[in-house]
Amino acid sequence: MTTLRKKIYMTAGYNTVSLGTGRKEFHPKKSRPGIEHYLKEAGEGTIKKLGGAEKIDESVVGNFMAPRYNKQGHLGAFAPMISPTLQYKPGLSVEAACASGGMSLMTGIKSILAETADTVLSLGVEVQNSVKAVYGADILAGAGWFQERKDGHAHFFPGQFSDRAGAYFKKFGREKTRKAYARWYKNAIENARLCETAQEYHNSHPDPESLALTTEPNPKAFTDHLTAFDSSKVSDGASAIAIMSEEGLKKHNIPFSLAVEVVGYGHAVEDLTQKPKDLTKLETMQNAVQKALEMANITKDDLGTVEIHDCFTSAAIMGIEAIGLAPHGKGIDFVLDGHTARDGKVPFNTTGGLIGWGHPTGATGVHMAVTIWEQLTGNAGDAQINIDPKRPYGMSVNMGGDDKTVMVIIYKNAAS
């Protein structure tokens, strides 16, 4: 079993607003902030909590498709724009499709392990509302095997997870599965309403669960088996967090009570050119989860909260099963029994997840880490949940493409 050779911490998380349809300030015909705005806001937010950038050793930006969405590459060199103190310090950008934010975190973790840095500024960013949805679908198809694009659904990735939903319906029953999807949507919206930066923060529908359940999939408008309520939205936003050694915490005078310790991680990839062996399972996710649990020397029963990559409700249900919290085909019962609600056995996506908070693709993995950091240090504000002392660990699960790259990180409060 691989173990961490030194202690790693995260602190000083910051999220911008996840901007897109659903936010009152969003208007598709009005000018909106560019990618540089989001990088600067998120980076400055974390730097302010650190008391300055002088002791930051390097920075890393997770991003998926800025060269196509924004005609902008070379994102690592934006660091000195965030703070002049970062001038001439190492900075780079990384990409792993929808897991680009998780890759940013992993890159920072490995710099700490390699002892080339004591403090790494990890950022994730995506600005996607720069193109119409039909063009965005084509861009997002690059997270999969693009040679399949011409034979795929017009909404390429919703189509892939719709196919997974259809296979799950056939194997475990459509009616009950759609009820679980609707309950997941309800939980996402209710959690997002407690987080001011969430894309669905302003959502005031009186019965989101009924709305999702009574809206039938329409393949002429979207996909065969999923509706818009089963899908994360197009989002603009950024998140940042500081990754540190114990020496880094000391340099910034950060107490352990304001930090989380990374106790395990798992990183797994699967052949991008191959179709899933079983449409009803996320096998790459399962592999990465097991690696993380083994490194942390805990079991799934020690998890007190989870941030799962619910790009679609179908991914959420299969993700619960990939973690091992429910047997194959029983993830729907786990949700319907209330176990994933904010007052359930294992609260999931406490600020809304990808469906509720938003999915600015390259930022999502970092946003997950920020949410876990907020919860485990008691800094989640209105979104705060009670962490069971018998289940003190948090887990983030960031997935790129259709279960092709997965980064899983396990955290605990550094003072515990």
Image (cartoon, rainbow, N blue to C red):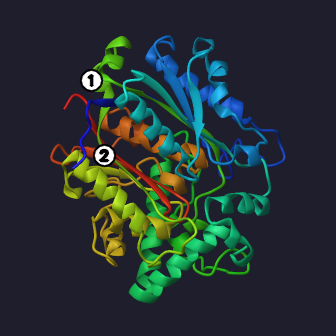
Q: Position of residue 116 (x, y in %)?
A: 42, 23
Relative side of 214 to 150, left or right: left
| Residue annotated with mark 2 | 394
In depth, the one of 133 and 86 nearer the eye is 86
Q: Position of residue 2 (x, y in %)?
A: 25, 46
| Residue annotated with mark 1 | 256
**Precedes in sequence: disc 1 or disc 2:** 1
Q: Residue furthest left?
A: 390
Residue 181 at least partly seen: yes
Circle 1 SS class:
helix
Quarter of the image for residue 32 reads top right
Number of numbered discs present? 2
Relative side of 390 to 41, left or right: left
Circle 2 SS class:
strand
Three-letter code, disc 2: Gly
Q: Residue at x 36, y 56 (%)?
A: 288
Number of residues whose C-alpha sits closer than 10 Å to that of mark 1, classed few (under 14), some (14–19) or many (20 or more): some
Q: In the image, is residue 212 above or below residue 175?
A: above
Q: Position of residue 348 (x, y in %)?
A: 37, 55
